Image: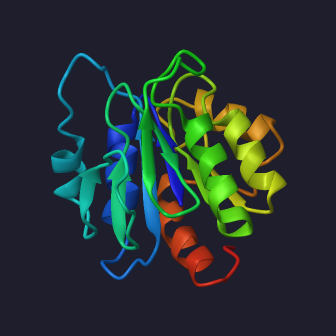
Amino acid sequence: MAIAASAGGVVALTNVLGHLPATFGAIMVVVQHLDPRHRSLMPQVIGRHSKLPVVLAMDGMELERGHVYLAPPDRHLLVNRDGTASLTQTELVNFVRPSADLLFESVAAAYGERAIAVVLTGAGKDGSMGVTAIKERSGTVIAQDESSSEFFSMPSAAIKSGAVDFVLSLDEIPAALQMLLAGEVPD
């Protein structure tokens, strides 16, 4: 399961991850656009509210269910088919690194129809190409709705791609993720 956020994303991620139970059995990989010039305190900030362990992903790390892996600042996070993480510092994608598009494309390739992508509040259009890759492999895509987004550019670009299955408020997303993980379709 991959989540992407940018402007306003710390609050949105804290809300979503804070409402998932400790028994949530998915691997969660997260891209949050951050200033690469500063050390990231995201694992501590989000971890205070999450019942799931939250860590910065490391290159070659084996990804475990029930854990949240954050892309480090200035590194693209990719998920490999063997269940490990790869970090790269290749060129910027849509003017950002880490890139939601690259993360979503790798999750689509690794998990196919089991892939789930969530696009939360943010500026720009990062994620709009990656959600198409998720959809092409029969995965599921959720976008945050306009009324609950601090910045609607990223969710809007994803919605305009035609690949979004559910447009939900921030408060509805955790329950929808739990339903999808249980093989149910959200309302």
Q: How is the image coloured?
A: rainbow
Identified at 40% across, 46% down, the residue is 12
**Relative to 70, does residue 54 appear above or below in the rendering?**
below
Which of the two residues, 127 or 111, is positioned nearer the viewer here? 111
Left or right: 142 with respect to 30?
right
> What is the x, y in percent for residue 46?
24, 51
Among the 4 quarters of the image, the one containing residue 116: bottom right
The answer to whether residue 44 shows anywhere in this view is yes
The quarter in which the C terminus is drawn is bottom right
**Relative to 149, does residue 55 appear above or below in the rendering?**
below
Left or right: 95 with respect to 39?
right
Identified at 39% across, 30% down, the residue is 75
Which of the two residues, 62 or 56, is positioned nearer the viewer here? 62
> What is the x, y in percent for residue 22?
30, 78
Among the 4 quarters of the image, the one containing residue 53: bottom left
Among the 4 quarters of the image, the one containing residue 166: bottom right
Identified at 57% across, 51% down, the residue is 118
Left or right: 141 with respect to 89?
right
Which of the two residues, 86 or 20, is positioned nearer the viewer here? 86
Identified at 58% across, 84% down, the residue is 182
The answer to whether residue 167 shows anywhere in this view is no
- Label count reads 0
**Relative to 68, does residue 86 appear above or below in the rendering?**
above
> What is the x, y in percent for residue 40?
21, 33
